[in-house]
């Protein structure tokens, strides 16, 4: 058995108070290590000889395993910010080396410190990291009366957050920027999003938001967003059918959806909005629609949505991704080989849902049941619309739906 398995990697969390904030026992872990890894700021904060310090390369991830394996058999200490298991280096190390290899000594996380300053309950506070994601990813977390903590990329993040709040009907929300939490230079700045005038803040900050909604259109995580939330050329699964379709797809945190025939991307977008850990890939043949799908995803807070070319030919480009958890066929069902290719890519226990609005595609749904099992249902949605001074029920196109769980 390699020596590296027997020698744990010590992961030590350091707050903004640096070395002074560590206990004697934690300091001893750092001092006795043969090598100490960390960022330049973290390494500068510990009284360890320079010969034993190693600053991470940038980007870090491609070289992380090699950098630590170089010291195989020797004691290694990795410095993290606050709690290394809260959006920190500890999570990455656990994924690369396994949890059994790590010995983690956390400091208070930025979440704990911020909640302590704000008087918020930690377990009911929503946290969004914008360290490596666009500010738009904050959108799905916003809701009236909810407390949200944002982990900032740098000193420009608070201003970007305030602008997003204003644009989404949350301009009256109370915003508190907490800088250098737990350190001697700790400072807070308070305002509403509408009155935010602060320039670039300290780079080490978190943003606490007390959400107050004063807009007109609520965009929640519940599927069935208003049709007007989407831009496009009219190729859109309407809100009522969208909600029923997402219910059949049954998203669960961390699962991946393939959306075939994306149109405006609404099914994949609302799949991802249900939980920040959900992922989706949209397959769309028309370039202008791929552009509008990407724009809709960014506007609605899921910029990580992937949009690729036509199915099933584009499936080959994702061969290394493995089986998917759920697959929706919203277009292209009549294409030769489409159904077989889609079914083959879904994992055992995964869900396949197909919607049909034409007689030809609806007829194919009977074949779907015959070949792969499952069930059929059909929806007829009516919307009340003005008819002179009265209201008339306007029928939408009926939608037939096939739902199956792969054995």
Image (cartoon, rainbow, N blue to C red):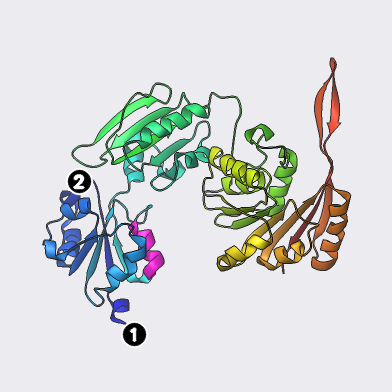
Image quarter where the N terminus lies is: bottom left
Report helix, strand or loop for mark 2.
loop
Count of numbered circles in the view: 2
- Is 313 situated left or right of 136 in this image? right
Determine whether 391 is above or below 350 in the image: above
Of marks 2 and 1, the one in the foreground: 1
- Is 397 situated left or right of 236 in this image? right
The quarter holding residue 363 reads bottom right
| Residue 117 visible in this rendered orientation of the protein | yes
Residue at x 70% of width, y 37% of height: 233
Image x and y of residue 16, in percent: 23, 45
Image x and y of residue 244, in percent: 73, 46
Q: Is residue 400 magenta?
A: no
**In the image, which residues are magenta?**
89-99
Q: What residue did someone put label 1 on?
A: 1
The quarter holding residue 240 reads top right
- Is 395 situated left or right of 158 in this image? right
Q: Distance between the Cα atoms at labels 2 and 1?
A: 40 Å
| Residue 265 visible in this rendered orientation of the protein | no
Report helix, strand or loop for mark 1.
loop
For disc 2, the neighbor class at 10 Å (few under 14, some 14 to 19, many from 20) is some
Residue at x 18% of width, y 61% of height: 25
Determine whether 180 is above or below 383 in the image: below
Q: Is residue 98 magenta?
A: yes
Q: What residue did someone put label 2 on?
A: 17
Determine whether 253 is above or below 67 in the image: above
Residue at x 59% of width, y 40% of height: 296
- Is 378 situated left or right of 12 in this image? right
Mark 2 / mark 1, whichever is N-terminal = 1
């Amino acid at each position: 058995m390699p020596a590296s398995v027997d020698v744990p990697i010590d992961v030590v969390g350091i707050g903004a108070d640096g070395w002074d904030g560590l206990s004697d026992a934690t300091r001893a872990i750092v001092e006795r290590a043969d090598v100490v890894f960390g960022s330049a700021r973290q390494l500068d904060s510990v009284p360890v000889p320079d010969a034993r310090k190693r600053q991470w390369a940038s980007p870090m991830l491609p070289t992380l395993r090699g950098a630590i394996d170089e010291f195989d058999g020797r004691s290694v200490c990795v410095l993290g910010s606050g709690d290394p298991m809260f959006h920190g280096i500890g999570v990455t190390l656990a994924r690369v080396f396994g949890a059994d290899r790590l010995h983690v000594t956390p400091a208070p996380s930025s979440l704990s410190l911020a909640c302590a300053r704000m008087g918020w309950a930690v377990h009911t506070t929503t946290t969004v990291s914008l360290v490596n994601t666009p500010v738009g990813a904050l959108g799905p977390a916003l809701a009236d009366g909810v407390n949200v903590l944002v982990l900032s990329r740098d000193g420009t993040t608070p201003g970007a957050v305030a602008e997003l709040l204003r644009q989404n009907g949350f301009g009256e929300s109370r915003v508190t920027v907490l800088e250098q939490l737990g350190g001697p230079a700790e400072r807070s700045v308070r305002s509403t999003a509408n009155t935010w005038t602060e320039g670039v803040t300290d780079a080490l900050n978190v943003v606490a938001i007390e959400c107050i909604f004063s807009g007109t259109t609520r965009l929640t995580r519940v599927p069935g967003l208003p049709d007007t939330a989407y831009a496009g050329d009219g190729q859109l699964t309407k809100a009522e059918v969208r909600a029923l379709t997402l219910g059949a797809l049954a998203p669960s945190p961390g699962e991946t959806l393939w959306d075939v025939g994306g149109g405006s991307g609404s099914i994949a977008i609302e799949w991802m909005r249900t939980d920040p850990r959900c992922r989706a890939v949209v397959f769309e043949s028309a370039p202008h629609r791929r552009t509008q799908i990407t724009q809709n995803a960014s506007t609605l807070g899921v910029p990580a949505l992937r949009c690729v070319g036509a199915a099933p030919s584009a499936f080959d480009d994702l061969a290394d991704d493995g089986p998917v958890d759920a697959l929706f066929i919203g277009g292209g069902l009549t294409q030769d080989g489409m159904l077989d290719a889609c079914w083959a890519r879904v994992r055992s226990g995964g869900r396949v849902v197909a919607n049909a609005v034409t007689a030809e595609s609806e007829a194919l749904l009977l074949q779907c049941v015959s070949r792969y099992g499952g069930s059929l249902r059909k929806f007829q949605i009516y919307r009340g619309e003005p008819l002179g001074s009265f209201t008339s029920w306007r029928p939408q196109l009926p939608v037939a739906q096939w739902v199956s769980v792969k054995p």
